[in-house]
């Protein structure tokens, strides 16, 4: 018997890579969220705290020092990994990231078939977690959520 070895080549366009990445991350997140629902609120809180800490560690590792550093890093990650349509504005003292669309949010909504209550809770959690990240860097965080967009302003 002969074994054939084939080296896999990158053939996907960026859009397909981003959509697939968002779907994979969303499925992992939703799976954890569903399993933790059976374990109670304390398990949800611990999971959330761990996720936030990993993000903080990443942002520190890439050298975030200012609000603009933070929104730039967040935006680049969101766009490149998940295909999110994001904008940033501001300066070193006050900066805003605005999600016109969020690849992860869209994947979670599609895959999770979320209720209105679940969507609201996830939005609240996202705002709270982002505020924890801001606090770690000594920034204030101001969320602004509308039906179609979500933005967060960070200031010193």
Image (tube, rainbow, N blue to C red):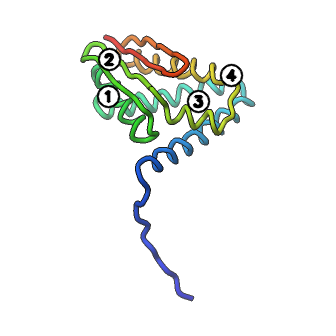
The residue mark sitting in front, 3 or 4, is 4
Provide the secondary structure element on which disc 3 rests.
helix
* Dot 3 alpha-carbon crowd within 10 angstroms: few under 14, some 14 to 19, many 20 or more: some
Mark 3 or 4 closer to N-term? 3
Left or right of 48, for residue 152: left
Q: Residues within 10 Å of mark 1 (few under 14, many from 20)?
A: many
Residue at image x 52%, y 17%?
Answer: 128
Q: Residue furthest bottom?
A: 1
Instruction: Tell me which label, 4 or 2, sits earlier in the chain.
Output: 2
- The reply to whether dot 4 and dot 2 touch (C-beta < 8 Å) is no
Give the residue displayed 56% in from the left and 45% down from the top: 24
Position of residue 26 measured from the top left corner of the image (x, y, whole percent): 58, 39
User: Height in image: 15 above or below 60?
Assistant: below
Residue depicted at x 45% and y 74%: 6
Could you give the CA–CA distance between mark 1 and mark 2, rounded to whole angstroms? Answer: 9 Å
Mark nearest the camera among 4 and 2 is 4
Q: Is residue 75 left or right of residue 52?
A: left
Q: Disc 4 versus disc 1: distance between alpha carbons?
A: 30 Å
- Mark 4 or mark 1, which has the lower sequence index? 1
Alpha carbon of mark 3 to alpha carbon of mark 4: how far? 22 Å
The answer for how far apart the CA atoms under marks 4 and 2 are is 30 Å
- The answer to whether marks 1 and 2 mark residues whose Cβ atoms lie closer than 8 Å is yes
Q: Which mark is residue 116?
A: 4
Mark toward the start of the polypeptide (1 vs 2): 1
SS for dot 4: helix
Q: Position of residue 148 (x, y in %)?
A: 52, 22
Quickly name the residue at label 2.
95
Q: Which residue is mark 1?
A: 72
């Amino acid at each position: 018997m002969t074994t054939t070895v084939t080296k896999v080549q990158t053939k996907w366009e960026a859009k397909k890579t981003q959509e697939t990445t968002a779907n994979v991350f969303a499925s992992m997140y939703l799976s954890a969220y569903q399993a933790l629902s059976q374990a109670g609120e304390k398990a949800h809180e611990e999971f959330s705290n761990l996720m936030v800490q990993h993000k903080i560690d990443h942002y520190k590792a890439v050298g975030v020092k200012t609000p603009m550093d933070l929104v730039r890093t967040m935006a680049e990650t969101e766009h490149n990994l998940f295909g999110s349509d994001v904008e940033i504005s501001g300066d070193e003292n006050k900066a805003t990231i605005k999600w016109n669309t969020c690849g992860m949010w869209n994947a979670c909504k599609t895959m999770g078939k979320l209720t209105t209550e679940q969507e609201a809770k996830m939005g609240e959690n996202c705002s709270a977690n982002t505020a924890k990240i801001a606090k770690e860097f000594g920034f204030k965080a101001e969320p602004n959520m509308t039906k179609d967009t979500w933005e967060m302003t960070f200031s010193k």
